[in-house]
Image (cartoon, helix red, strand yellow):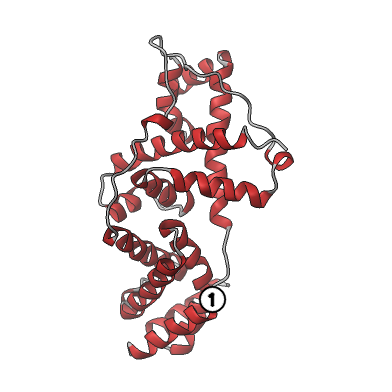
Amino acid sequence: MNCRDLSHFLDEYLAGELPTDVASEFELHVSRCGNCDTYLLQYRETIALGRAVAGEIGAAPEELIQAIMASLKAAK
Amino acid sequence: MQAADESALAESIRAGDAVAFETLVRRETPRLLSVARRILGNDDEAGEAVHQGFIAAYRARDQFQGDARLSTWLHRIVVNKALDVLRARQRRPEDAIEDLLPRFREDGHHQERFATWPEMESVIDRERLSGTVRDAIATLPESFRLVLLLRDIEEMTTDETAEALGITPNAVKLRLHRARLALRTLLADRLQGAHP
């Protein structure tokens, strides 16, 4: 397995979906290639940083809530 | 909310109870507005998507299945409303993503040497970091940005994402992989320049 192959398999590896023999090759490459080790770390961190954005919830304007309630009353 | 309370609220919603719907609107609007803002990048359009989503949910209230959560049901409705708004926008040509993907030499090795990222919390504060991530996601070409949003941030499954976007599950997987690769590149550019 080379760096290009490893890049191709990143998602399946992280999802635990790679066949055992391919996962072993993946891990062997990472253990020998510092550049791919760094890349894998950053790929994981990228996913985690993206997911952290989901926790950000701003306030909802009262006018919007009132407008929604008015529409629901009218829809009765 | 306790499961019994949630179940009672769902039952009242199905029965068309206005007070129950107001409880739901007040509880869910902040979260749903954030979801629509992430997809649309525009407060006015996001508010309209949430507004239309609640009207659609109200009209379809008797179709709500008790085995789902109200919040999940509303989330899917609002995501679809936000995607409808996006589709109605004038389409702009999309930038190619290839420039943001890793490049390899003929022997399959990376062309680039990757520098270790700085410790996030020690370099920039949490608010700036969130802004950096949001800005990087917003820079992704639209068809990749949407898949990344729905899969990684809205936590929809591959099949749900495929259905919402009208593409195949395999296309979702491919786009998600490319979107994550591209986002890593964009974050690397931003984070490595973020030393105080």
In front of the other: B11 or B195:
B195
Residue A46 quadrant: top right
Q: Could you say which is closer to the camera, residue B6 or residue B95?
A: B95
Please name whichever residue, B127 or A9, is drawn nearer the observer in this view of the structure: B127
Q: Which residue is mark 1?
A: A61
The reply to whether residue A30 is visible in this rendering is yes
Task: Name the side, left or right, on which B84 lies relative to A16.
Answer: left
Across and down, in percent, residue B82 comes to: 36, 63
SS at mark 1 in the image: loop
Residue A19 visible in this rendered orientation of the protein: no
Name above or below for residue B153 compared with residue B57: above
> Where does residue B68 sit, x and y in percent of width and height?
41, 66
Residue in view at x 42 percent, y 64 percent? B75
What percent of the width, then of the height, locates residue B71?
A: 46, 68
Question: Left of A42 or right of it: where is B99?
Answer: left
Q: Which residue appears farthest toward the top when viewing the image?
A: B107
Quarter of the figure with the C terminus of chain B: top right
Q: Quadrant of the N terminus of chain B?
A: bottom right
- What residue is shown at x 57% (from left), y 65% (from top)? A58
Q: Residue drawn 55% across and 33% down?
A: B189
- Chain letter of disc 1 in the image: A
Q: Amino acid at mark 1?
A: Pro
Q: Residue at x 44, y 25 (%)?
A: B102
Write down the quadrant of residue B195 in the picture: top right
Q: Residues within 10 Å of mark 1 (few under 14, many from 20)?
A: few
| Residue A69 coordinates in the image, percent (x, y) | 44, 85
